[in-house]
Image: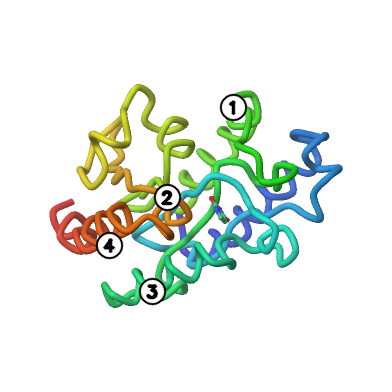
């Protein structure tokens, strides 16, 4: 797929979510769809859970406290937002920031898969349990974080969610240490 076509193809997937009225209850309560952001030709795609309040207001993923922490960790390995692509499994904010329901994750999965099909990253990084469960079913994040997994031809790196790690000293250091493995994992692919 030509690099120049990727933004247009991603726009089409975004339009399809709206046209097909995916998760209408979530859509009705949300300010807007938070589709994804970053470089459509990136080697790395990061996938979070669902937009929070700031993301819902700005229409961009990971722009709140967890996003700031994520930016710091990216900078630690010499990367900026423009170098990666970032999105969520569920693309509307769940009311009150509740966990996404299984049927909501299932409803958005074909669109996430379509995004990955367009971007064709070398490495998919799942952030937290929800995004890992959707893409790598049957694993336990406590046991497999920081360990690359190959599944159906795609390399994944499951990591803890930055929001969960933000105020938990031990998990925070584990996430920072796992993040530092990204360049080596990418180089080995
Ligand atoms: N947490 C997420 O999982 N995604 C966001 O976009 C923001 C916070």
CA separation in Å, label 4 and label 3: 10 Å
The image quadrant of residue 95 is: top right
Where is residue 54, by image quadrant? bottom right
Residue highlighted by disc 2:
161
Q: Which mark is on residue 15?
A: none
User: Which element carries disc 3, helix, strand or loop?
Assistant: helix
Q: Nearer the viewer, mark 4 or mark 1?
A: 4
Instruction: Respond yes or no on whether mark 2 lies under 8 Å from ligand 1.
Output: yes
- Residue holding disc 4: 176
CA distance for labels 3 and 1: 31 Å
Q: Secondary structure at mark 4?
A: helix
Residue ID for mark 3 = 72
Label 4 crowd bin: few (<14), some (14–19), many (20+), radius 10 Å:
many
In the displayed structure image, the side of residue 132 where residue 122 appears, left or right: left
Measured in 3D between alpha carbons, the distance from the residue under mark 3 to the one under mark 2, in whole angstroms, is 14 Å
| N-terminal-most mark, 3 or 1 | 3
Q: CA distance from mark 4 to mark 1?
A: 30 Å
SS type, badge 2: loop
Where does the image place residue 28, in percent across and percent down from the top left? 86, 42
Mark 3 against mark 1, which lies toward the viewer?
A: 3
Residue at the (54%, 44%) spot, across then down: 49
* Mark closer to the observer (1, 2): 2
C-alpha gap between disc 2 and disc 4: 11 Å
Q: Is residue 170 above or below residue 139?
A: below
Q: Which residue is mark 1?
A: 106
Quadrant assignment for ligand 1: bottom right
Mark 1 and mark 2: span between their CA atoms? 20 Å
């Amino acid at each position: 797929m030509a690099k120049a076509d990727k933004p247009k193809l991603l726009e089409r997937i975004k339009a399809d979510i709206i046209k097909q009225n995916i998760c209408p209850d979530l859509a009705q309560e949300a300010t807007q769809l938070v589709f994804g952001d970053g470089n459509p030709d990136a080697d790395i795609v990061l996938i979070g859970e669902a937009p929070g309040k700031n993301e819902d207001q700005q229409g961009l993923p990971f722009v709140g406290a967890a996003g700031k922490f994520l930016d710091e960790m990216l900078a630690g390995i010499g990367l900026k937002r423009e170098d990666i692509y970032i999105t969520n499994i569920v693309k509307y904010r769940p009311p009150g920031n509740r966990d996404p329901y299984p049927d909501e994750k299932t409803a958005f999965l074909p669109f996430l898969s379509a995004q990955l099909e367009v971007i064709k990253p070398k490495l998919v990084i799942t952030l937290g349990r929800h995004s890992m469960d959707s893409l790598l079913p049957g694993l336990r994040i406590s046991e497999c974080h920081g360990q690359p997994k190959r599944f159906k031809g795609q390399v994944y790196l499951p990591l803890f969610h930055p929001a969960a790690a933000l105020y938990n000293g031990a998990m925070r250091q584990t996430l920072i240490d796992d993040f530092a493995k990204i360049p080596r994992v990418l180089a080995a692919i």
